[in-house]
Image (cartoon, rainbow, N blue to C red):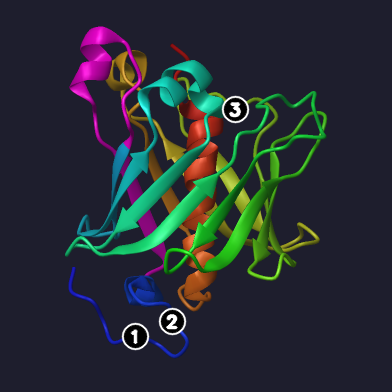
Amino acid sequence: MPAPPPPLNCPPGLEYLSQIDMILIHQQIELLEVLFSFESSNVYEIKNSFGQRIYFAAEDTNFCTRNCCGRSRPFTLRITDNVGQEVITLERPLRCNCCCCPCCLQEIEIQAPPGVPVGYVTQTWHPFLTKFTIKNQKGEDVLKISGPCIVCSCFAGVDFEITSLDEQIVVGRISKHWSGLLREAFTDADNFGIQFPRDLDVKMKAVMIGACFLIDYMFFERTR
C-alpha cells in the first residue's frame, strides 16, 4: 500500500494509519514451532481491510526468555514499513501474568518513532473481567478496553470492546478471529482485527496496535 501524504503532527511512518478504520494482524506460522514444540520469535503481517500489507512486525527476544517465561515474557516488538524502516516499537516489561496479583499488572509502551513514547496500555485489575486502560504519552487515561470474563477462542472469535472512559460509548473493537480447527489446535498463529474511527489520532491507532499485541501474548500465546 503506497503511503498517503502525512497529516499534521504525524510521526514518520504512521501516515498509513490516517486514512483507514480497520487493521488486520496475521501471525505467521513458524514451522519449527509445529515440528519441535519450542517457542520461536513471533512475526506478523499488518494489513488494511483490502489485504494490502502496510507493516511487518517481528519479536526481538532470546531463546531462553521465550521458552522459560512463555506468555509472560518481556519483549521488544519492532514494527517496520514496507521499505524496512522501523516506525513503531513496542516494549513490554516482565510482569506476573496472574489476575490474583493486582500489584504487578501487565503493561506495554508504544513508541513512534522508536524511542519516543506516544502512549501506554495498562491492565486494570478486576476480579472477573479483562480490562485495560489506554493512556496517552503523558500517562493520562484516554480510553478503556473491556473483554469477556473467560477468554476462550474455541470455535468462535473473541471481542474486546474499546470504550470511552465511562464505558458508555463503544468507539472500536479488537477481535481475535477463529482461524480454523487445525491452525488453532497445532499452532499459536493467531489472526486479529482492530476497528477504530477513521478520524482518530494516528498515535492512538498505534497504541491500539500495541494493545492488540499485549492481548495476544497474554491470552492466546500457547504455553509449551
**3D distance between C-alphas at marks 1 and 3:** 37 Å
Res 19 seen here:
no
Disc number placed over residue 151 in the picture, else none: 3
Question: In the picture, residue 100 is in which quadrant?
Answer: top right
> Label 2 sits on what residue type?
Cys
Of the pair 177 and 70, the residue shown nearer to us: 70
Q: Give the range drawn in magenta.
A: 20-42
> Label 1 sits on what residue type?
Pro
Q: Is residue 173 left or right of residue 147?
A: left
Q: Earlier in the sequence, mark 2 or mark 3?
A: 2
Percent across and percent down for residue 206 are 47, 63
Query: Mark 3: few, some, or many residues within 10 Å (few <14, many ≥20)?
Result: some
- Disc 1 target residue: 6
Q: What element carries label 2?
A: loop
Query: Mark 2: few, some, or many residues within 10 Å (few <14, many ≥20)?
Result: some
Which corner quadrant holds the N terminus? bottom left
- Disc 2 target residue: 10
Question: In the picture, residue 61 is in which quadrant?
Answer: top left
